Image (cartoon, rainbow, N blue to C red):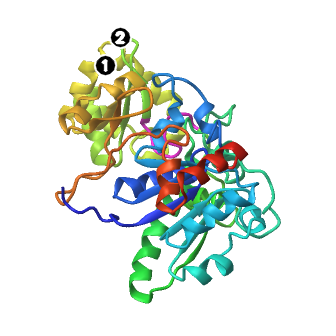
Amino acid sequence: MSIRPLDGITVVALEHVIAAPFCTRQLADLGARIIKIERPGDGDFARGYDTQVEGLSSHFVWVNRSKESLTLDLKQESALAILRGLLKTADVFIQNLAPGAAARMGLTAEVLQKDNPGLILCSISGYGNDGPYRDKKAYDLLIQSEAGFLSITGTPETPSKAGNSIADIAAGMYAYTNILAALLQRGKTGKGTVIDISMLEALSEWMSFPMYYAYKGANPPSRSGASHATIYPYGPFMAGDGKTVMLGLQNEREWAQFCALVLENPALAQDDRFDRNFKRNEKRTELLKIIDACFSQMTSEQLIARLEKAQIANAHLNDMEGLWKHEQLKARNRFTEVGTPNGAITALLPPGLNDSYDYRMDPVPAVGEHTNAILSELGISSAEIEVLRAEGAI
């Protein structure tokens, strides 16, 4: 087995749900050891969100493979002492508790870096560790709303959220990249770093195009469903078999190709109602009638064949079954298996093909599965472990 980039790096994660677990799973993919701290009994409450994957939670199996589960009741001093012991030799400590919660347990940079100057501390919260919104509750949908995402997503009548947890995912991605950068910086300075990740700031970065589009009070992009807000035709169109095809034009050359080879009406390209994108955008309803009259005579596959011939960008409107069966993912061997407490499940390999190493794809842990082994590493005897368990500390 070749060496992975993060082999030998230990991450202690006081994490739950998506943002921090998504970050640490990616660190695990690259070889890092992730010690996930969970509550005794039920563990991370994302374990109970649903039972869609062989009786396990879809959220949990997605972001928690390749981790070790250690149960600790951090309300008890004996359990907190175990966590502090782990952090004396860890490389990274990541947590997404409510702002101030870690500090109340004494888990601050000032305290922890005295014993471990190279420790990298990363916190993820809704709004950051200061400011007037610091203590405001923050769930993914609420951050999508605060960041203006809902204002540009959906139909003109109905603002809509993203179908997955994009605010959590954005925060997890920036935590991941900040931690990688901190590890590189520590290699130069020998010192650890304190990282403060805000879900609002992460998603606001992803909102920069519409923010600039509305620069200095200009009108923002309108909500236009699955269609592009400012380019037309660009979005979903119905074929004669009732299936939807996505397509997108980017320039006037493509508009001419679209008219000639897809609509088989080359003269339409010169029609002064539609000969510039801004005109087509303004006259969507009028142009849609012409497009629908043509597309209704074709199946979706016939339509896609014409779009391919014209070199017009297009896509199937896949559902989840279509994604599981996607021929491109299969052709590139992007599916593998990982173990779980309920048996092996299919899993996507992480994005990015490389020729230097294989991603780590170890099992999703059961609650507390590695507690005994980790405590033994810390020099805690079997008898002491049984006392801790009897006290409910682990």
Local crowd size for mark 1, using a 10 Å CA cut-off: few (<14), some (14–19), many (≥20): many
> Rounded to the nearest whole Å, what is the CA distance between mark 2 and mark 1?
7 Å
Q: What is the three-letter code of the residue carrying label 2?
A: Asp
Rendered position, 199 above or below 320: below
The percent position of residue 154, horizontal first and vertical second, equals 61, 35
Q: Which residue has dot 2 on it?
A: 241
Q: What is the three-letter code of the residue carrying label 1?
A: Ser
Residue that sits furthest to the front in the current view = 383
Q: Quadrant of residue 14?
A: bottom right
Q: Earlier in the sequence, mark 2 or mark 1?
A: 2
- Residue sitting at x 46%, y 39%: 62
The percent position of residue 269, horizontal first and vertical second, equals 32, 38
- Residue sitting at x 34%, y 19%: 294
The percent position of residue 215, horizontal first and vertical second, equals 63, 65
Which is the main secondary structure of the residues drawn in magenta? Answer: loop
Q: Is residue 229 magenta?
A: yes
Q: Quadrant of the N terminus?
A: bottom left
Residue closer to the observer: 374 or 229: 374
Residue closer to the observer: 177 or 314: 177
The percent position of residue 203, horizontal first and vertical second, equals 59, 56
Count all numbered tags in the image, as a single digit.
2
Which contiguous range is marked in magenta?
Answer: 224-234
Would residue 241 appear left or right of 369 to someone viewing this image?
A: left
Q: Which residue has dot 1 on it?
A: 300
Local crowd size for mark 2, using a 10 Å CA cut-off: few (<14), some (14–19), many (≥20): few
Q: Is residue 48 magenta?
A: no
Residue 264 seen in render: no
Rendered position, 53 above or below 385: above
Instruction: Determine whether the residue tagged by mark 1 lies in a helix, strand or loop.
Output: helix
Label 2 with label 1: CB-CB less than 8 Å: yes
